Image (spheres, rainbow, N blue to C red):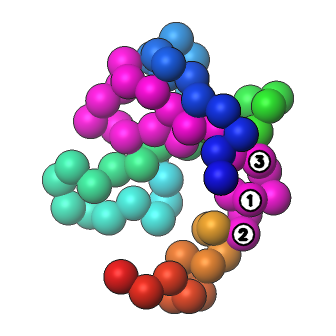
């Protein structure tokens, strides 16, 4: 579960496309490293939209599950 949300993610700088985003157009997730309260995640198609902030351990667990193919479609 997200810790909280940021209503306008464009106020933060340093977003990067997640290495786990697909190459298809419109399938981009961006993350922000070094945010004190956790790991913000946003949809790259909506940069002024919200970002969800996950705990660092929660985000790491999610990334590991994606990498290992543990999440069914």
* Residue 14 quadrant: top right
Residue 43, how many percent across, how many down? 37, 40
* Residue farthest left in this picture: 25
Residue highlighted by disc 2: 61
For the residues bearing labels 1 and 3, Cβ distance under 8 angstroms: yes
Name the disc covering residue 70, or none: none
**Within 10 angstroms of label 1, few (less than 14), some, or many (20 or more) residues?**
some
How far apart are labels 2 and 3 at the CA level?
A: 10 Å
Q: Residue at x 78, y 51 (%)?
A: 56
Q: Are marks 2 and 1 in contact (CB under 8 Å)?
A: yes
Q: Position of residue 73 (x, y in %)?
A: 36, 82
Q: Which residue is nearer to you in this view: 36 or 52?
A: 52
Magenta highlight range: 41-61
Residue found at x 74% / y 59%: 58
Kindly identify which residue carries mark 1. 58
Identify the element where label 2 is drawn: helix
């Amino acid at each position: 579960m997200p810790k909280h949300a940021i209503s306008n993610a464009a106020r933060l700088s340093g977003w990067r496309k997640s290495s786990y985003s697909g190459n298809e157009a419109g399938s981009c997730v961006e993350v922000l490293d070094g945010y004190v309260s956790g790991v913000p995640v946003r949809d790259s198609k909506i940069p002024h939209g919200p970002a969800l902030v996950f705990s660092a351990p929660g985000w790491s667990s999610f990334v590991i599950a994606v990498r290992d193919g543990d999440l069914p479609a």
